[in-house]
Image: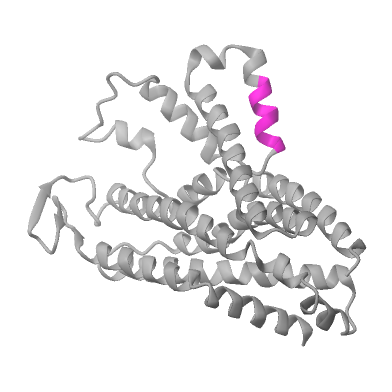
């Protein structure tokens, strides 16, 4: 019963901050925008046929075309919910623990027969439900548009819902630790987003090293980048897992298609991009998620220890 109260309080707090309504509005806009796009055997249409672009790359009757359409959906999910949505969620939930730990609010909860570690975990997981709802609000409507309007049913796309919750949890543990340590909503929001930028920078550097042969051949740089990548939560692997489970068109298939992209002037060659994508898509889901959850568990245990020792 106490946990249900925590869940209801967290959802009520998020609704008061209007972030969930914002996410619902973004989902509605994206869904309507997707409805304005159509895919035919030999063309892509915009605004119900007002503009027509001749191409066979998005033919929903072929496996290649379905993979290309799935790639669009994953890109929307990754950039809109996986970046903008998660950032809004971090801002919305940054105040959950500082508000929860205020005098008067925490006293009422501590009066109930529940241990502090369980109280901490209950509040933490109740906050994740907010992100779960936001992910469902985006993924389910776009999944239905892909199936009913674009004629491309991709069941693997529904797996992006738990992936988005995982992505948020990797970052929210930092927010919670800062909130418990400093009881500051602003610090929790800024430092969790700052940590995300650091994680992204480490993984981006590793990706560039993998793509550029000159950097990859330097063993010192290559080994340092690999170690650094595995020491932080693999936020970028969420996208690669989604692409694999949704069976999006691979770079190798794109370059061997009838309309390959022009790579002239790029820092890396097509074969480097193909090799890089193969490696990233073949990464073990258990390994990347497990190591990221290991990092999260360490931060959470530390935060829970501090929370249990606080003098309220």
Q: Main secondary structure of the magenta part?
A: helix
Above/below status of 18 relative to 222 = below
Q: Residue at x 57, y 40 (%)?
A: 197
Give the quarter of the figure containing the C terminus. Answer: bottom right
The one nearer the camera, 11 or 166, is 11
Q: Residue, x 57% and y 73% (percent of image)?
A: 14
The reply to whether the magenta stretch includes residue 224 is yes
Give the magenta-colored segment's residue range. 223-231
Q: Nearer the viewer, residue 226 or 190?
A: 190
Q: How many marks?
A: 0
Q: Answer with the quarter of the image where residue 60 lies.
A: bottom left
Looking at the picture, how far across and down is residue 245, in whole percent? Answer: 49, 53
Examine the structure image and report whether residue 284 is included in the region drawn in magenta: no
Vertical arrangement, residue 205 with respect to residue 138, above or below: above
- Position of the N terminus, as image quadrant, is bottom right
Tell me if I can see residue 253 in this picture. Answer: yes
| Residue ID at (48%, 64%) | 158
Where residue 15 appears, as percent x and y from the top left, is: 53, 77
């Amino acid at each position: 019963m106490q946990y249900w109260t925590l869940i209801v309080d967290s959802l009520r707090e998020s609704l008061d901050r209007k972030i969930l309504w914002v996410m619902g509005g973004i989902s509605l806009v994206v869904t309507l925008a997707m409805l304005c796009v159509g895919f035919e055997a030999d063309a892509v249409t915009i605004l119900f046929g007002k503009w027509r672009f001749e191409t066979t790359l998005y033919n929903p009757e072929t496996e290649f075309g379905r993979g290309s359409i799935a790639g669009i959906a994953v890109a929307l999910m990754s950039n809109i919910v996986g970046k903008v949505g998660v950032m809004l969620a971090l801002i919305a939930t940054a105040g959950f623990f500082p508000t929860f730990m205020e005098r008067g609010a925490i006293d009422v909860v501590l009066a109930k027969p529940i241990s502090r570690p369980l109280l901490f975990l209950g509040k933490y997981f109740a906050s994740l439900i907010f992100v779960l709802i936001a992910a469902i609000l985006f993924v389910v409507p776009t999944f239905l548009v892909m199936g009913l309007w674009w004629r491309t049913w991709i069941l693997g796309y529904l797996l992006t819902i738990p992936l988005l919750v995982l992505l948020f949890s990797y970052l929210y543990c930092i927010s919670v630790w800062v909130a418990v340590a400093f009881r500051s909503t602003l610090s929790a929001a800024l430092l969790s987003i700052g940590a995300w930028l650091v994680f992204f920078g480490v993984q981006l550097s590793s990706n560039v090293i993998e793509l550029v042969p000159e950097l990859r051949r330097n063993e010192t740089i290559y080994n340092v980048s690999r170690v650094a990548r595995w020491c932080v939560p693999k936020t970028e692997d969420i996208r690669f897992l989604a692409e694999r489970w949704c069976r999006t068109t691979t770079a190798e298939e794109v370059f061997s298609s009838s309309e390959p992209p022009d790579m002239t002037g790029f820092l890396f060659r097509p074969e480097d991009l193909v090799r890089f994508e193969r490696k990233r898509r073949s990464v073990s889901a258990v390994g990347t998620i497990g190591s990221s959850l290991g990092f999260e568990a360490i931060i959470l245990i530390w935060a829970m220890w501090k929370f249990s020792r606080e003098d309220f």
